[in-house]
Amino acid sequence: MFTKIIAFLTALIMIFSPYAMSVIGATEGEPIIAAEREHVYDADRLLTGVYCFPKDGRFDTLLGYLDDAGIDFFIGSWGQNLTEDDFARLQELGMGIFAPNSEYYRTVDSDAVWGIDLRDEPNAADFDDLAAAVAAQYEQNPKRLPVVNLFPMYASDDQLGEYPAIEPPGNPGVPFDSFNSSAVSYRMHVSDYINRFDSDVISVDIYPLNMAHDDARTLSTWDKWLRNLDILAEACRKTNRDLWVITQAAGNYVDDNGGQRYCDTVGDQRWQNYVSLAFGAKAIIYACFYTGWWDADSHMIDSAGERTDTYYAVKDANAELAAFADVYGEYENTGTFIVNRLNKDAAGCLLPLTKCEAKKPSVRTSAPVLVGCFDKTEGDGNAYVITNMYEPQTGKTAQVTVEFSGASSLTVYRKGGVSTVSGSKLDLTLENEEGVFVEVNG
C-alpha cells in the first residue's frame, strides 16, 4: 500500500510539475549531432514553402502565383517531371523544389533542386532503412537536403511504431511525461529519430485548428500543440538541427463529430507562424498549395486553378515574415516558455514545456502568452517572439508588459512594419492570433 501511495504522489508531482521531461535519452543510444552542411538553399534566413504543387497545364501560371505570395520553395511535384526550362525559371525566381524521390530528380544537374522528398510520416520500423537512404543522398549530392517528415504527436502508437517495437528505458520513472501517454510515445519517437538520422533538419506537420464536436461547430485548438513543438525544438537545440514546420493552410468540414476547419483568414495563418517561430522554426511550409488531402476548394489554389481566400491569407501573413526573415536568421532559439498556461481560455497549452534555461525577460500579463527566446549566433544580442495564446473563438486581446533587462532600445517587427522603442520596457496590446518579433539593443 505504501508503495502505491508513493507512486500516486510521484505521478501527481509529474502532472503539476512546471517542466516536462526531456526527449534526450528517451530511448537507448546517443543523439547524432548534425553536420550542419552547406546546402543549395540559404539556411541563414527564415524560409517559406508550400506543400503539394503537381505539374500540369497550369504550372506556369501557378508558379507566378507562388512567386507573388513570396514563397521560397515547394515540396512535392507529382505528375510530369520538371524540365530544364522549368528549372531555369525557378532559378530566375530564386525558388527551389524538394523533388520526389526518383532517379531523375536525384541525378538531374540543377541548383533549383534544393533537396529530395524522401518520406512523409514514417513508422519507426522504417527508420534504419530511411537513415541509410539519407546518408546515400548526402553521399550522392551533399548540398541536397533529403527530407523525412515526421508524424505529429497526435499520431497513434501504431503509426509511430514505438510500442512494443522500441522498449522504454529501464528507469521506470522515465516514461512519464506529465502523465500523458501521447507525449511519452512521441518523445521516444523523436529520440529514436535523432539517434539514427544524420540530417540537418527535423520536419513535421501539425494541424492544430479544429472544430469542436458540437452542433455549433465551435472553433477549437489542439490542446497539446505547444508540447509537440517543444519536444521537437529541444531535439533541434541539442543536436544543432533546424526545425521545419508544415502548417495548416486548408481545411474541410467532415461529419457530425467535427474536424479540421477552414484556415482562410490571415489571423489563422499568422498565429500558426508565430507559434512555430517561438520554438525556433527555420522554415514555415503551408499545406496545401494546389491539390492535397483537404477539401479542394479550401487549398490556396482551388480545383479550377483559381486563388482562394486561403491563398490571400497566406500571402499577407507571409509578407509579414519577409520583413524580418533575414534578421531572424541571425538568431538561434534557446528556449520557450508560456505565461498563464492554466488560464481557462489558453490555447494549446495543456502540457507544460521543458525547462527553459534561456535568458528570460520579465513578463507582466493576465493573458496566456508564449515567449520564444533567442541568442545571436555571432556576437552578443537577444531577440524574442511574443504571441497571444488566447483561443481564437474568444476574440480576446492580450495586454502585455515586457521588461528586457539592460536594453537601451527595442526593435519591434509587427504586421510587416518595424519600429524602435526607447528604453527596456515594451507595452503591447496583442490582437487575437497576433505575434511580434522583438530585437533587444544595447
Image (cartoon, grey):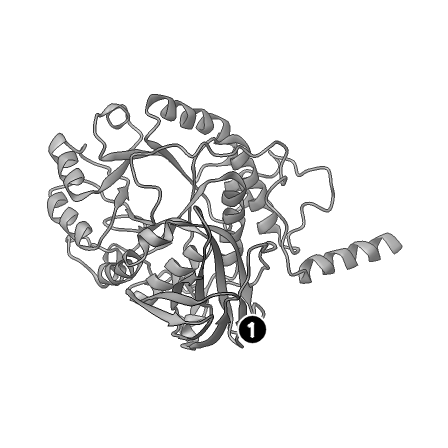
Question: Left or right of 233: which side holds 421?
Answer: left
Dot 1 amino acid type:
Asn
Residue shown at the point (65%, 56%) measured from the top left: 178
306 or 349, which lies in front?
Answer: 349
Residues 130 and 362: in front is 362
Could you tell me residue 301's position as x and y percent?
Answer: 20, 54
Residue 296: % across, % down: 25, 54
Classify mark 1: helix, strand or loop. Answer: loop
Indicate the quadrant where residue 136 lies: top left
Q: Which residue is mark 1?
A: 343
Which quadrant holds the C terminus? bottom left
| Residue 420 occupies quadrant | bottom left
Q: Quadrant of the N terminus?
A: bottom right
Horizontal side, residue 50 vs residue 34: left or right: left
Q: In the drawing, does residue 408 fall left or right of residue 413?
A: right
How many marks overall? 1
Q: Residue at x 42, y 35 (%)?
A: 36
Decide if residue 402 is on the left or right side of residue 429: right
Residue 117 at least partly seen? yes
Name the outermost residue toward the right: 2
